[in-house]
Image (cartoon, rainbow, N blue to C red):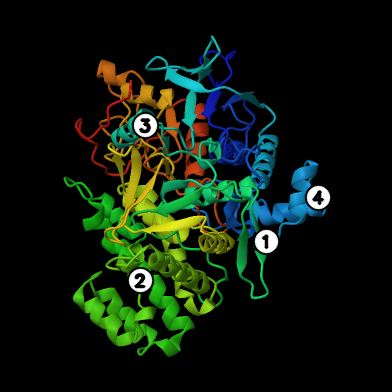
Amino acid sequence: MSRSANPSVRPSVVIVGAGPRGTGLIERIAANAPELYGDAPLDLHVVDPHPPGGGRIWRAGQSSLLWMNSRAEDVTMFTDETVEQDGPVRPGPSLAEWARAVRAGEISVASGPAEAAAALGPRDFAGRWLQSAYLGWVYERSVAALPPRVAVHEHRRTAVRVSGPREGRQQVWLAGRPAPLLADLVVLALGHLEAELPPEQRKLADFAARHGLTHLPPAFTADTDLSALRPGEPVLVRGFGLAFVDLMVLLTEGRGGSYTTGADGQLTYRPSGREPVLHVGSRRGVPYHSKIGYELDGERPPLPRFFGPEQVDALLARSGTDLDFGRDIWPLIDKELGFAHYHRLFTAHPGRTRMNWPDFEEKYAAADAGGAALQALVGAAVPDPADRLDLAALDDPLAGLRYPDGAALQEGLRRYVEADLARRHDPAHSPDLAVFLALLSVYGQLVRIGDRSPWWHGFFSYLASGPPGPRLRQLLALSRAGVVRFLGAGTTVTADERRGVFRAESASVPGESTEARALVEARLPEPTVAHTRDALLRALYADGAATTRTGLLAVSAADGRVLDRSGLPLVLGSARTGRAPHHPRLFALGPHTDARSGGAFARPRTNAPAFRQNDATARALLTFLRDRSAPPVTLPVRRAPTTEECHAADQ
């Protein structure tokens, strides 16, 4: 069978982004090629200004003080039998297993990563630069697994635009390269992107410029120049998630501070004198929950139960109405998380319940999520309120709490963090781990529906993707040393034109405020098409690509094809010509899409959404190249955004 109308032209795929998502796609192409593509020739062009494997976010050249927030045994780039995919499973080592193989001399790496791997235990939190070495090894292994006639071409450049005729090869233009790459298919695996400042941030930046202040907008912390934050001076920090943890590390240990451990196991911080004083607050006013420090023994909750394929099919089958997250989706998630929690409580800790599990399960299934009947059931069956799942209280733990002054707030927040650390490392609270597993299951189902709630992504991260326990112990030591001070919940920051300073206030200590000449927004930029600095994505929007109400790139849940504003696969130029789409050639994977999956790598044996997506996209690519007409794809029933809902491109 001829692979091209011109046999002398080799089929070509351009993958924009060589980080873990692009690497995972190549692994799936290698796994599926023998079945779908045989030994036919193919050029794979991999475009990224950063080294392949780690890409920008996981590059080796960042501080060795920065850790992953997952244990080594909980990180893998390889599929297993739990992954729902049509392609074959190609087993591979987790980060912990890879480190073990490096120690045993079975895998060769450079001396620096080899030394770090030798000291890495399966339950340790690896440095990000070591993860970069693992990802680089996965990339090299995946490339080596490709069929002999597949050639990989690496381009250490930035892709700035995709263009091309309605039918035929696309042109991928790279910065500094006069001629474009020609591609039958293009995949965008762009990862986390820089963004233009939204209006509020522009006002704060202008205020800072007028008054000679420091304003650091949302950004990847490892890329941020922190030199303007001067020793001893107060710095306001908005955001209490992982970006804050990185900031905390770089401004303390990164400036020469150190920790000592006392006889009671408590950490004490020894300052270098070069640290600023960090005043940190957020909507919740507390850090993300600590990573759980034990394994789940015994029976696992049988998931999914109330939010699985059947429920998602029913949601997607609705016609004529748009899905509302709070009305249509959250009640199912609420019930799913509660089911996991109570299943674990009744089966692992039956002495803390007053009903047998079959009776409770039957009544729980019949009750409406959040309704009076369910609350009455839980109240009767679970006597201790501390054993009941209260998601609203988890999301807003300081709601209604008021402290007389800042000193009382510091003590109260330290007690909160200490209690969280104790609970997250105590198997007596194993329903928390069951809820964590349910959160992973829910995330996997939501990929089919698309991203419909920024709140959900933050809630998931707060409960399921928090920092390692040792980082929170360091936070406590920094608080005791006065290097970190807590602002509280509902933190607001205003620009005081008269005094020329930033001022922070919170609901936790009414009437008190904190002034500073520096403000850090400790979070990643929102991954929206409207505000991205990525020229390629902006141009795609101008060519007709659809975005969601939250500004993410709309893609097919089936295989990652980029959708136009009618909800059909995008063909470049169709928005201008009005012609029907045909032979879609553009795909997208990652956090800038509405099918974002929570991470390019995952815990083993969790049916990871990213792995499922990678497999589906790889098979669609290979099928298209083989047949030059991809089979029909069943798209989810999803109302296309209206013109008013679509974000305008930032030209």
Q: Secondary structure at mark 4?
A: loop
Q: Which residue is mark 2?
A: 338
Q: Earlier in the sequence, mark 4 or mark 2?
A: 4
The residue at the far left in this view is 320
- The kind of residue on which mark 2 rests is Gly
- The kind of residue on which mark 3 rests is His
Quadrant where the N terminus sits is: top right
**In this rendering, does residue 630 appear at all?**
no
User: Percent from the top left, x then y, of residue 163?
Assistant: 42, 17
- Disc sitting over residue 53 in the figure: none
Q: Secondary structure at mark 3?
A: helix
Q: Nearer the viewer, residue 196 or 202?
A: 202
Q: Which residue is mark 3?
A: 211
- Local packing at callout 2 (Cα closer than 10 Å; few below 14, some 14-19, many 20+) is many
Q: Secondary structure at mark 1?
A: loop
Label 1 vs label 2: CA separation? 30 Å
Label 4 vs label 2: CA separation? 45 Å
- Disc sitting over residue 122 in the figure: 1
- The kind of residue on which mark 1 rests is Pro
**In this rendering, does residue 119 appear at all?**
yes
User: Percent from the top left, x then y, of residue 194?
Assistant: 44, 32
